[in-house]
Amino acid sequence: MSSTSDKIKGTAKEVAGKVKQGIGEATDNSRMKGEGRAQEAEGKLQKNVGKGKEAVKNTIDRA
């Protein structure tokens, strides 16, 4: 998976997690809020992996 793909998919997961948390909050569903927090964290991690890949690629390209 490319760095751009990781960043895009990570951002999408992060947004979906925030939406799920909002729905969980609105419906007083603690399970959905927890799933949303986990999905948001997973998205942030994937986005950071993409940023890391991009940094490594840029370093290699400069060498």
Image: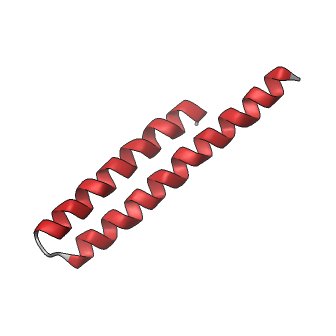
Compared with residue 52, is residue 22 higher up or lower down, i.e. above or below? below
* Quarter occupied by residue 61: top right
* Extreme-left residue of the structure: 27
Q: Is residue 2 visible to us here?
A: no
Q: Report the label total.
A: 0
The answer to whether residue 59 is left or right of residue 52 is right
Residue beneath the point at 82% across and 28% down: 60
Residue beneath the point at 12% across and 66% down: 26
Compared with residue 34, is residue 55 higher up or lower down, i.e. above or below? above
Q: Is residue 35 visible to us here?
A: yes
Nearest the viewer among 1 and 46 is: 46
The answer to whether residue 45 is left or right of residue 59 is left
Q: Position of residue 27 (x, y in %)?
A: 10, 70
Q: Where is residue 57 in the image (x, y as percent from the top left)?
A: 74, 30
* Quarter occupied by residue 45: bottom right
Compared with residue 21, is residue 58 higher up or lower down, i.e. above or below? above
Q: In which quarter of the image is the N terminus?
A: top right
Q: Where is residue 35 in the image (x, y as percent from the top left)?
A: 32, 68
* Quarter occupied by residue 4: top right
The answer to whether residue 3 is left or right of residue 10 is right
* Extreme-top residue of the structure: 62
Residue beneath the point at 30% across and 56% down: 18
Q: Which colour scheme is used?
A: secondary structure
Q: Quadrant of the C terminus?
A: top right
Residue beneath the point at 59% across and 34% down: 3
